[in-house]
């Protein structure tokens, strides 16, 4: 524990008052250590998620069934890599080099989002991920437009803009499949059945805003449960109107507009994000391998560029 | 009047672009660094886009659609050059192939741009406007790797390995121009070898097509995707 | 280590250049290709500026210790003066011929 001297304590108090009243923070500004640490960890996890989110989808670039789908899926994955680039740059400017972030990621020392720890089995998964995983993500990301750290909020505009194309692409894949053969329709239903539990965990367990230090520093401004409710309100009716079902008998919209659902298994969420998901180790092993194979490029080309 | 050779010519180009685009998109998400990943993915997408435009022209003459031409032919009917078929998920070879292909493609496009067939000349010009950036990208990488102690031997080995395949991208009469351009850039001569000609497919093509069409084949022909 | 380049983008001709983000690249040639794809691949930019971060000279300390606010709009409180002037005009107007 480092002890705060009186001056640091004063500065911390006024910094907190500044961010809580809507004030913004720039890279070169003084910020409390706690703020910098939490912010760095949060944005790093966001970056890791974009980067790891590439893996469940990239195999399907090669299997995409038409030229148009192949182009759209490649563009989506390219956007995700681009988001990782934008996010790691912000992390780097906060003081943690990208190489260290990547080392920590493949060593399992830092986390990435739960949904990217699951396998993608069929082309139906490609549609469900692009439509619903990206829909869930855009809800959190839109809320981050109000983040107190301005460089993060600024890149979120580009990220949200690009995510909106992914949702369209995903919905188009889904609509084409549900209006296709019985087997194609079944691809969607089967994928939805598998993805629903991870989707319900996506926004995290409910933490009251007043107990959440991320909300206190105004890094986040949207409580987890509010994000999940927004997701359910926006997308469950869209799923149902296609004649598809969701594997939760309790799922319904109350008269007060609040959605009821079966409590997700939060222990599973914790286990999954700490590297014990069905595809966690395979994905990390793949990243380790691909990083080893291109290590010489970064070493020679980048190092010699000094 | 259309002649079969026009379709063949379109398919030479389209199959090259499709297969190379497919190979290059194997890097999407795992390129040596993130900025490069984004740039190289654009190149892969451009190539697929070129393939699509060319397949559309071919499909019009064949009375079908671009996807059917791209996906639904037996392996033996693909007209791609073996250079683009090789599975080479290694960066020095990827750059060597990228640059050799772009250099050969530039030679080929210059001829097509001057074609009497206005439609063909037009699409060649359109493709070439995007290829300009591919060539800039390829050349900056060649310069970087040649200027690096670790990169140079890797790149040289890859160039020597792929050289007979690169020659096979072009017809006999265009090959000397490729030799001139490549040797001028490298400042050295390349091995005097027999080209690996178009139509002599590598085994990797069959595997690639198997994977490429796996989803498409899972529904009866004519299903929408 | 690669260099960091700050990227500015313009959405359309006539608009202002706005900071878009940054990229890391081994040199200017790489930076150009990378910025092109990262900040313009959807035609969302009409022009980009690339600036090596080291070339940016930042000024962020603006001092106004003596409250020289005559240079700003809030340096002028016209409301009171205007009220006063109107009242004055109202009282004198009655005496002048030709005023309503």
Image: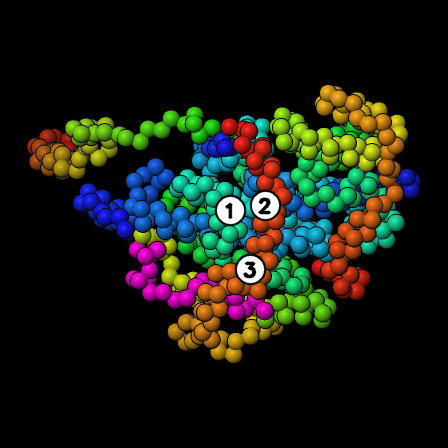
Name the one closer to the observer, C93 or B77: B77
Distance from Cα at disc 1 to Cα at disc 3: 15 Å
Judging by the rendered image, the residue that carries numbered circle 3 is A280
Judging by the rendered image, the residue that carries numbered circle 1 is A102
Q: Is disc 2 in contact with disc 3, using a CB cutoff of under 8 Å?
A: no
Question: Is A142 left or right of B112, judged from the image as shown?
Answer: left
Q: Is disc 1 in contact with disc 3, using a CB cutoff of under 8 Å?
A: no
Distance from Cα at disc 2 to Cα at disc 3: 16 Å
Judging by the rendered image, the residue that carries numbered circle 2 is A291
Point out the image quarter for the C terminus of chain B.
Answer: bottom right
Name the one closer to the observer, A289 or A244: A289
Tell me if mark 2 has few (under 14), some (14-19) or many (20+) residues whose alpha carbon lies within 10 angstroms of its own: many
Q: Is residue A233 above or below residue A215?
A: below
Tell me residue C97's x, y (percent).
12, 30
Q: Chain of mark 1?
A: A
Q: Secondary structure at mark 3?
A: helix
Q: Secondary structure at mark 1?
A: helix
Tell me residue C59's x, y (percent).
33, 28
Question: Is A2 left or right of C95, judged from the image as shown?
Answer: right
């Amino acid at each position: 524990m480092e002890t705060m001297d009186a001056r640091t304590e004063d500065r911390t108090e006024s910094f907190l008052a500044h961010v809580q009243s809507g004030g913004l923070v720039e890279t070169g500004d003084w910020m409390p250590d706690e703020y910098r640490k939490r912010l760095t960890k949060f944005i790093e996890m966001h970056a890791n998620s974009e980067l790891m989110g590439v893996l469940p989808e990239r195999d399907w670039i090669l299997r995409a069934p038409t030229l148009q789908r192949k182009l759209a899926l490649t563009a989506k994955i390219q956007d995700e890599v681009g988001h990782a680039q934008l996010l790691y740059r912000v992390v780097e400017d906060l003081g943690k080099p990208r190489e260290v972030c990547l080392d920590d990621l493949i060593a399992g020392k830092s986390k990435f989002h739960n949904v990217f720890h699951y396998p993608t089995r069929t082309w139906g998964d490609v549609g469900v991920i692009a439509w619903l995983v990206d829909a869930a993500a855009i809800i959190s990301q839109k809320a981050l437009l109000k983040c107190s750290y301005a460089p993060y909020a600024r890149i979120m505009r580009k990220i949200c803009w690009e995510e909106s194309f992914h949702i369209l692409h995903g919905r188009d894949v889904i609509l084409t499949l549900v209006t296709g053969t019985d087997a194609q329709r079944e691809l969607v239903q089967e994928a939805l059945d598998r993805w629903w539990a991870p989707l319900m965990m996506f926004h995290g367990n409910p933490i009251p805003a007043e107990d959440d230090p991320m909300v206190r520093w105004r890094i986040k401004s949207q409580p987890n449960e509010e994000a999940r409710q927004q997701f359910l309100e926006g997308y469950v009716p869209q799923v149902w109107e296609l004649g598809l079902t969701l594997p939760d008998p309790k799922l319904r919209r109350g008269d007060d507009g609040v959605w009821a659902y079966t409590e997700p298994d939060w222990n599973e969420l914790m286990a999954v994000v700490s590297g014990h998901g069905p595809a966690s180790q395979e994905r990390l092993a793949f990243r380790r391998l691909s990083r080893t194979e291109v290590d010489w490029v970064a070493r020679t080309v980048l190092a010699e560029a000094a | 009047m259309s002649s079969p050779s026009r379709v063949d010519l379109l398919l030479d180009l389209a199959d090259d672009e499709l297969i190379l685009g497919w190979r290059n998109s194997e890097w999407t998400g795992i390129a040596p660094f993130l900025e490069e990943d984004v740039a190289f993915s654009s190149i892969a997408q451009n190539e697929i886009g070129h393939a699509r435009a060319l397949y559309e022209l071919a499909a019009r003459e064949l009375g079908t659609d671009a996807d059917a031409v791209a996906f639904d032919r037996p392996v033996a009917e693909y007209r791609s050059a073996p250079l683009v078929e090789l599975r080479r998920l290694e960066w020095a070879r990827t750059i060597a192939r990228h640059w050799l292909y772009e250099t050969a493609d530039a030679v080929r496009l210059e001829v097509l741009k001057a074609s009497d067939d206005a439609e063909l000349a037009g699409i060649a010009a359109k493709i070439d406007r995007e290829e300009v950036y591919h060539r800039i990208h390829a050349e900056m990488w060649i310069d970087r790797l040649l200027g690096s102690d670790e990169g140079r031997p890797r790149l040289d080995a890859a160039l020597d390995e792929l050289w007979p395949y690169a020659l096979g991208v072009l017809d006999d009469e265009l090959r000397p121009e490729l030799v001139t351009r490549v040797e001028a850039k490298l400042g050295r001569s390349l091995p005097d070898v027999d080209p690996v000609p178009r139509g002599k497919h590598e085994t990797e093509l069959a595997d690639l097509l198997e994977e490429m069409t796996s989803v498409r084949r899972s529904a009866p022909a004519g299903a929408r995707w | 280590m690669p260099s960091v380049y700050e990227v500015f983008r313009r959405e359309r001709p006539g608009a202002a250049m706005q900071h878009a983000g940054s990229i890391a690249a081994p040199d200017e040639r790489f930076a150009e290709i990378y910025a092109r794809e990262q900040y313009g691949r959807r035609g969302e930019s009409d022009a980009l500026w690339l600036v090596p971060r080291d070339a940016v000279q930042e000024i962020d300390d603006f001092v106004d210790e003596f409250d020289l606010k005559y240079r700003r709009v809030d340096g002028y409180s016209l409301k009171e003066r205007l009220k006063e002037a109107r009242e004055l005009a109202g009282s004198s107007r009655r005496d002048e011929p030709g005023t309503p």
